[in-house]
Amino acid sequence: MVARGRRETLLRAVRRPGPERDALLLQAKGAAAAATAWWLASWLLPHTVTAFAAFTALMALQSTVFRSLLDSAQYLGAMALGTGVAAAFGSTAGVHAWSVAVLAFVALTGARLNLLGRQSTQVPVVALFAFAGGGGEIGYIGHLVAAASIGVCCGLAAHVAVAPSPHTDTAQEMTGDLAARAQDLLRTLACAAAGEGAEEASPKEGDRRCEELAREAVRVRAIVDKEQENTRLNPRRPWSSAEGSLQRCQDTISMIERVGTHLRSVSRALSHARRATATEEVLASYAELLRCAAAALGCLRLPRGPEDSGRLDDCLEEAARHYDDVAASVRQGRLDTPGEWPVFGTALTEAERVLDEIRHIREQADHACRSAS
């Protein structure tokens, strides 16, 4: 099973651009940068620091150019701080068990300040390496810094030479799949309200689907975040169109996350509503309301925006009519069982919030079209 998954990943990397190909290219660039850094360091510096150049080259190669530049700058700062501490102890206390302990304590304190981001943890590593390995001698520290500089330069050069491009198509496709999940969840809850498909449309199944939607939204957002970061300081600019597309993906994901929160409340309300009395007619109308909301969400064609605005308007108007029907049925119905009014009030409120989210994202799409024209 694992071998099959790896084979499919490799095939996707070969067939088309995307995250899989970027990961494969990053491995190749890392191997080339590490070998080049080691060769240059072995030619220019003592053999005791050549491995450090190769290690730093690998550290400099992150998933995006922006991340590589940021981590490299932070790492060089951590190296300056760590080697400074090692040089200070080496020229005063000398290398002893107690001085190593004191140096480690000072370096760890500096790392806890978190002044250098996630590279702060490298301060004690560099300090101990320079102190215990080179006795804190200035000559050794100079070679160590030179090796790190060579590694950083090789890593950044490899990354910039073949910079990864933002995959807006992939981000849009994944965001569209997320929107389709939300649309399908609306249909599932509509079936649960109408009492159709007992197993597939049960309230318990709705809760599970809501949790899946929330997890998938987190995963897709992480991918879109990475693609947005990839547009920053990327030498293969301009990426103005990519930035706009990725921002629309972010807006869509945020909207779907809010819709998922509302639908979780709907699912819980329906689990109580099915046990209430005199509710069949109300639930049938509510099911149609959810189906219209699902149709309207499908008309949006997220994240690109609606192609048929007239059809979208019809869906929203029909949903509004069903909302009024449900509200009227609730007002006229004899909901005498304790807790029935809060249940239907919650269901109606959350459905209206879902429709408001659809209207809002539609307004954003219309505004973007007007701005582009």
Image (spheres, rainbow, N blue to C red):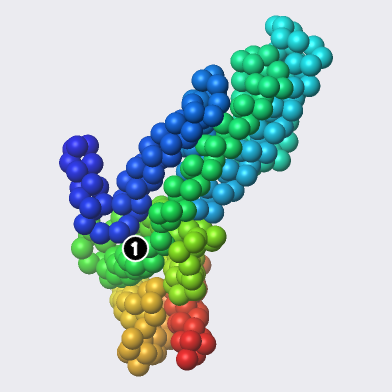
Residue at the (35%, 51%) spot, across then down: 22
Frontmost residue, 30 versus 10: 30
User: Which image quarter: residue 302?
Assistant: bottom left
Frontmost residue, 85 versus 213: 85
Compared with 97, 353 (above or below) is below
In the visual, does 279 lie left or right of 85?
left
Label 1, secondary structure: give it: helix
Query: Total label count?
Result: 1
Q: Residue furthest top?
A: 97
For label 1, the residue is 170
In the visual, does 115 lie left or right of 194?
right
* Rendered location of residue 274, percent (x, y): 34, 64
Residue at the (42%, 82%) spot, across then down: 323
* Rendered location of residue 192, percent (x, y): 29, 65
Residue at the (55%, 26%) spot, across then down: 45
* Rendered location of residue 301, percent (x, y): 34, 77
* Rendered location of residue 63, percent (x, y): 45, 49
Q: Residue furthest front?
A: 43
| Amino acid bearing label 1 | Thr
